[in-house]
Image: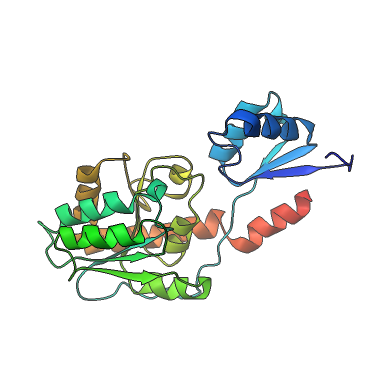
Amino acid sequence: LALGFRPTLVAVWGSDVVNVRGVSRFIVRRTLARADWISATGEFLGKAACDLVKGASERLSVIPFGVTPPDNPTPLPSGPVRLCFLKKHRPIYAPDLLLEAFSLSRRKVPDIRLSLAGIGPLTESRKRQTEELGLEDAVDFPGYLDYRKVESFFSDHHILVMPSRMESFGVAALEASGCARPVIATRVGGIPEVVSDGETGLLVEKENASSLADAIVRLATDRELMSRMGQDGRRYVQQKYLWETCLDKMCELY
């Protein structure tokens, strides 16, 4: 923008427009105001951009991240229900809350299991929390997953849980849905755009371990519901979030 190139497209991704403050807010507002067009990956982010700059809605395109679901998703595994978490181990993504809710859910579903994939500043403290809650035999920490292993990871599990305190979009939810796995998530940010409550998964309020545990128990004890929500999620992805379609829209915009 400073060099005067025209036309200029500015893409907003997340924390660059959500809760931005101080000097950063000034820079972001000026950048958006001078842009010829703005693209956002979801309605939530589009609104955040419009809240920063008057008139932005008139030059805004919402084009989401797309995903590439497998041609033939693996059926739900037999045996005990396995939950999975696939985010960086940071406070914003609430792995601490998930472990608390998981402990509560085990009172009604004793054989349930959990995989906390990813790494981050909270990894070691979550391992300690697992020990303190007496969950060592039910929780594993696979560590960082290469993108090429994500499909296989979801295939080995039954339900994705996203207890985030904030999410600008929620690509992991779409990846799980593409693999025909239901999603339990918090009703924050852009998550309601990618998880349809009661259809492709269940949404709960943030910071509520009890409600999260209830949702886990509800799905973990109803394989028919689990399967139906997974299949509905896959159709939802195919209708709205295929990578090729989203890429074509972005190329057309550019």
Q: Is residue 240 above or below residue 34?
A: below
The extreme top residue here reads: 54
Which x, y percent locates residue 63?
64, 48
Q: Where is residue 92 in the image (x, y as percent from the top left)?
A: 41, 46
Tell me if residue 165 comes above or below residue 247 in the rendering.
above
Indicate how the structure is coloured in the image: rainbow
Q: Which residue is depicted at the point 65% across and 31% down?
A: 23
Quarter-wise, where is residue 225 in the image?
A: bottom left
Residue 156, given in percent of the width and then of the height, sits at 34, 74
Q: Nearer the viewer, residue 133 or 192?
A: 133
Tell me: residue 119, above or below residue 210.
below
Q: Quadrant of the N terminus?
A: top right
Left or right: 79 as drawn, with respect to 45: left
Residue 50 visible:
no
> Can you say whether 113 is above or below 88 in the image?
below
Q: Which residue is drawn at 56% across and 42% down?
A: 15
Identify the residue at image location x=67%, y=29%: 26
| Number of numbered tags placed on the structure image | 0
| Quarter of the image where one finds residue 110 | bottom left
Q: Which of 90 and 42 is in front in this view?
A: 90
Residue 230 in percent (x, y) is at 36, 61
Q: In this view, does 128 lie to the left or right of 21?
A: left
Q: Is residue 35 left or right of residue 96?
A: right
Question: Is residue 28 visible to us here?
Answer: yes
